[in-house]
Image (cartoon, rainbow, N blue to C red):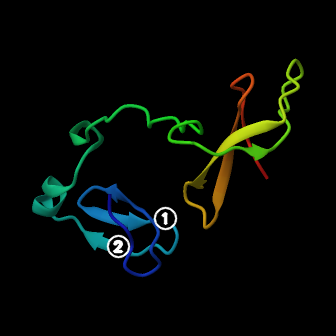
Amino acid sequence: MQFCDECGSMMHTEGDTWVCGSCDNVDERDPEAEAAMTTRDGQRDDGAPDVADATRDADETVAEPCPAEDCDGERANYEMLPKPGGSYEVRLFTCVECGHKWRGS
């Protein structure tokens, strides 16, 4: 993958050149540099990410009513996790009574 030095957009190949679709900048292709690029085939698959468990290492609970229709639970464990790609955290709740999980606001 090559990015344009002029505007930063991703470039595509046309013959022996890299061409920017945004600003029409053209760069010569370098076979040695391209050979060093990691392809999708060369990447490893670590599997699915772990799912957060709000009950893990949780000793304290908070007063948070369970939103499950068939549960009258009023207490939940919670865990704060960073939102992927975001600049704030998300609070994940787990009902102490039924184990239902939900995201807080």
Residue occupying the point 72% across, 27% down: 100
SS at circle 2: strand
75 shown above or below 73: below
Q: Amino acid at mark 2?
A: Val
Residue at the far bottom: name it. 6
Image coords of residue 42 (percent x, y): 21, 40
Cβ atoms under marks 2 and 1 closer than 8 Å: no
Q: Nearer the viewer, residue 32 or 59?
A: 59
Q: Is residue 53 left or right of residue 17?
A: right
Q: Amino acid at mark 1?
A: Gly
Residue occupying the point 44% across, 74% down: 8
Image coords of residue 55 (percent x, y): 58, 36
Image coords of residue 22 (percent x, y): 52, 69
Per the rendering, the mark at residue 21 is 1
Q: Which image quarter holds the N terminus?
A: bottom left
Residue at the far front: name it. 59
The residue identified by callout 2 is 26
Q: Quadrant of residue 87?
A: bottom right
Image coords of residue 13 (percent x, y): 33, 56
SS at circle 1: loop
Give the distance between the C-alpha atoms of the residues marked 2 and 1, in whole angstroms: 10 Å
Q: Nearer the viewer, residue 76 or 42?
A: 76
Q: Nearer the viewer, residue 80 or 82?
A: 80
- Crowd class of label 2 (few under 14; some 14 to 19; many from 20; radius 10 Å): some
Per the rendering, the mark at residue 84 is none
Residue occupying the point 37% across, 68% down: 3
Q: Is residue 22 left or right of residue 49?
A: right
Residue at the far top: name it. 70
Marked residue nearer the N-terminal end (2 or 1):
1
Residue occupying the point 54% across, 39% down: 52
